[in-house]
Image (cartoon, helix red, strand yellow):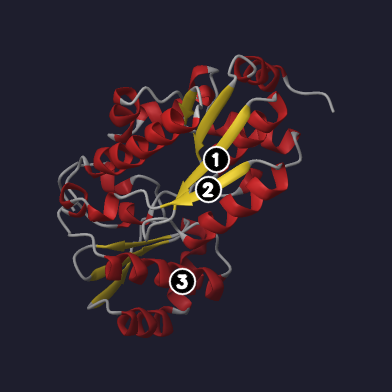
Amino acid sequence: MSLKPDTSKLLDYLKGFDSAVLALSGGLDSVFLMKALSMSGAKTLAVTGGTATTPPRDLRDAIRYAEEFGVEHRVIDSGETARVDFLANTPDRCYHCKDSLFSRLAVIARDEGYAKVLDGGNLDDLDDHRPGRKAAREHGVLSPLAECGFTKEDIRNAARGLGLEIADKPASPCLSSRFAYGVGITPEGLMRVSRAEDYIRDLLGVDELRVRDLGGRASIEVPYGRLPGLYANRAQIVERLKLLGFGAVEIDPEGFSSGKMNRVPGSG
């Protein structure tokens, strides 16, 4: 199989690592990087945080692809749900989450003799409100995809070139990103938004959506072209989400937009 030049550049970069611990979220970026690591020959341990903030299908994908690529994989308690500063859900929430995860990965790397800790950050991540990037810098975590010039679309194209089924998987940030800043994060709340999204995903056959928790009130986002189907099933969706514990349910008429909670940091 011939590789695109940018993928070849990435492989050359990774061949410079003797060994690495990879933060594997189960999303496209980190799965693609895991595949590249497996091709590079670097000894790799992929580690996934298995707390309630991780969407269940991402955990399943992490386990599945690590096994498929022959990469050693470990699921750990990444610890963020025990941190008061994370649960308070301020605009720097992501920093506290990543600080907790990367602290644990650094210990694993040190104690088990891995040279580097890597994550799946790409160039597009640098343009968004990403407090987690600060935690990565503080812990010396490297982002090979960003350093080799990969955007999200580059990753999708490269993944397709390698025949990876995950190439078209939508972005899937952790479930805590569904909560408006200032709305406290709880295990029950995380489970509620996860179950709500799974229900709507199965009902409508739509893969890209968000159920935002605006303080006990749910706001549903689907791609603009899928809004008619959402409105057509509104009654049963409202009924189901209220059974899950939401006090009120609304549909965002603007449609799905990734990172919408970050438009005005500190606001809902």
Q: Residues within 10 Å of mark 3 (few under 14, many from 20)?
A: many
Mark earlier in primary sequence (3, 2): 2
Which residue lies most toward the right here?
1
- SS for callout 1: strand
Disc 3 marks a residue whose amino acid type is Leu
**Res. 46 mark:** 1
Q: Nearer the viewer, residue 138 or 267?
A: 138
Disc 1 marks a residue whose amino acid type is Ala
Horizontal and vertical percent position of residue 267: 15, 48
Horizontal and vertical percent position of residue 84: 16, 52
**What residue do we see at 29% from left, 37% from top?**
99
Q: Quadrant of residue 167?
A: top right
**What residue do we see at 43% from left, 32% from top?**
111
Q: How far, Cα to Cα, is label 2 from label 1?
A: 6 Å
Q: Quadrant of the N terminus?
A: top right
**What residue do we see at 55% from left, 60% from top?**
207
Horizontal and vertical percent position of residue 124: 44, 29
In the image, 177: left or right of 43?
left
Dots 2 and 1: beta carbons under 8 Å? yes
In the image, 146: left or right of 52?
right
Q: Nearer the viewer, residue 222 or 169?
A: 169
In this rendering, the answer to whether 26 lies above or below 242 is: above
In this rendering, the answer to whether 235 lies above or below 254 is: below
Q: Label 2 belongs to which residue?
A: 74
- SS for callout 2: strand
**Res. 230 mark:** 3
Q: Quadrant of residue 31?
A: top right
Q: Residues within 10 Å of mark 2 (few under 14, many from 20)?
A: some
